[in-house]
């Protein structure tokens, strides 16, 4: 499982998460191995919509320009409503993991948890990441070989991460890097 390593960076705002994605892009990190997930900000007074046009997902609402830009950079996009978490927007390989989990059945976990597991996140960490997402923060996840995730960690660590965790298949406990 040499490609099931993951680095998870937690950001307080979409601006910080977007800066990390752009830094990885400028550093020529493989965007097909990068995911982002966060909650949408819905209010009773604000209409938010999603549609698919010309091969791309579109979003309008409070974070429309943010998600539109992210979806243009990363491979795959989706809107999911996860019970107890609410509306989540995601981009990257995580979307394929969530959709695959929905197609196959999630085996006692929610679709987000199953999707996170498919991109290298240990199941025992899923509840913590769900809690983080529920609080309105964003996860940026780089997955791939140990070399690729180490490179992503070095690039991401230069930014404004709240927490940076490394997950490797052989490690029983993630290595936290507090920013």
Image (cartoon, rainbow, N blue to C red):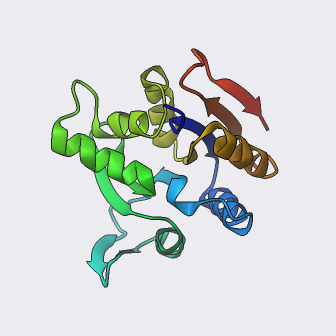
Give the left or right position of residue 103, taking residue 42 as reference.
Answer: left
Q: Find residue 174 and report its horizontal and vertical position in percent.
A: 62, 23
Decide if residue 73 is on the left or right side of residue 161.
left
Q: 121 above or below 141?
A: above
- As displayed, is residue 72 above or below residue 160? below
> Residue 170 or 135: which is nearer the viewer?
170
Quadrant of the image occupied by residue 78: bottom left
**Residue 165 to residue 40: above or below:** above
Most foreground residue, 43 or 73 = 73
Residue 43, given in percent of the width and then of the height, sits at 38, 60
Residue visible at 63% across and 56% down in the picture: 17
In percent of the image, x 74 and y 63: which residue is there?
A: 27
Quadrant in the picture for residue 85: top left
The residue at the far top in this view is 172
Q: How many marks?
A: 0
Q: Which residue is painted at 56% across and 62% down in the image?
A: 31
Whether residue 161 is visible here, answered yes or no, is: no
């Amino acid at each position: 499982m040499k490609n099931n390593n993951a680095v998870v960076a937690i950001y307080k705002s979409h601006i910080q998460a977007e800066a990390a994605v752009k830094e990885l892009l400028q550093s020529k990190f493989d965007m097909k191995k990068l995911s982002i997930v966060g909650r949408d900000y819905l209010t009773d007074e604000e209409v938010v919509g999603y549609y698919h046009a010309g091969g791309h997902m579109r979003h309008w609402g409070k974070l429309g320009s943010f998600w539109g830009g992210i979806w243009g950079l990363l491979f795959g996009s989706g809107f999911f409503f996860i019970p107890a978490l609410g509306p989540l927007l995601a981009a990257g390989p995580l979307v394929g993991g969530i959709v695959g989990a929905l197609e196959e059945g999630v085996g006692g976990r929610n679709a987000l948890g199953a999707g996170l597991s498919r991109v290298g996140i240990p199941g025992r960490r899923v509840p913590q990441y769900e809690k983080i997402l529920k609080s309105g923060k964003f996860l940026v996840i780089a997955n791939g070989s140990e070399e690729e995730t180490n490179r992503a960690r070095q690039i991401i660590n230069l930014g404004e991460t709240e927490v940076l965790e490394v997950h490797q298949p052989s490690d029983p406990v993630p290595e936290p890097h507090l920013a």
